[in-house]
Image (cartoon, rainbow, N blue to C red):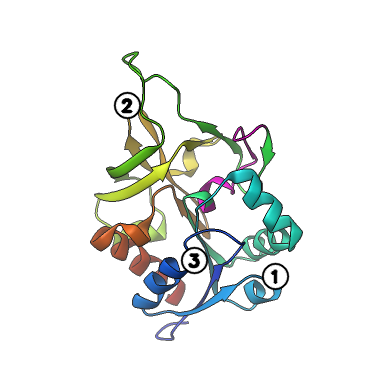
Amino acid sequence: MAGASPRIAVLDYGAGNIRSVAKAVERSGAAVDVCSDASGLRHADAVVFPGVGAFADAARSLAAKELDVAVREGIAEGRLYLGLCLGLQLLFEDSDEHGDAKGLGVLPGRVRRFPERGVSGERLLVPHIGWNRVVWSGSHPMLGSLPEEDVYYFVHSYRAEPADPAHIVGTTDYDGVFTAAVAKENVFAVQFHPEKSQRAGKRLIDAFVGWVRS
């Protein structure tokens, strides 16, 4: 892939800000296919899973089109994966959003709602909306192209709680530290929206395209 223009599939599962994510990836120098079927994912060099919507609804939509199987197979085969917001949450085993919903089970752990009250006892504003700082850690290939910390745009009411702390590569403080990014081998996913995060978001998408190209 060195020097080539990577072909990246942006997953269309019937929700999410597909167009803005696709444009962001194109601006970083990749050819983009917006895919709503499993065959499209299987022919891509890498997959971006954009995220807007409810966990359970997205899981049902993926299963109805057998996209859940295609995503898991692609990850198992080594295809690079970038998850954004809901694309991070669905990597985990389940979520307590609207009951008990099952995820892709790529990573062990659960997605839970922010507590109603923060560590000081005051009511916590949920969803968590706005710009917040992410501190990076670990040795994943993506991190070599990113500063030690940066500011990104968040919109979410639920947060991932990985069972294995080794999978956590980014953290954010919102009245307590929570997981803002996870990674394992060919998987990298973030809770924030890089497509809405201006220069910081562009740096992250550039890093992903560079990772695919390498």
Q: Decide which of tag 1 and tag 3 comes sooner along the chain.
A: 3
Picture residue at 59% right of the left edge, 48% below the top: 90
Mark 3 is surrounded, within 10 Å at the Cα level, by few (under 14), some (14 to 19) or many (20 or more) other residues, namely some
The magenta span reads 87-99
Q: Is residue 210 visible?
A: no
In terms of secondary structure, where does tag 2 sit? loop
Q: In which quadrant of the rendered view does residue 55 lie?
A: top right
Question: In the rendered image, which residue does mark 3 sit on?
Answer: 18
Residue type marked 1: Ala
Residue projecting furthest to the bottom: 4
Question: In the rendered image, which residue does mark 2 sit on?
Answer: 175
Number of labels in the image equals 3
Q: Contact, CB < 8 Å: mark 1 with mark 2?
A: no
Question: In the rendered image, which residue does mark 1 sit on?
Answer: 38
Quick one: 98 or 50, which is closer to the camera?
Answer: 98
**Could you give the CA–CA distance between mark 2 and mark 3, rounded to whole angstroms?**
31 Å
**Could you give the CA–CA distance between mark 1 and mark 2, rounded to whole angstroms?**
40 Å
**Residue 31 is covered by the magenta coloring:** no
Nearer to us: label 1 or label 3: 3
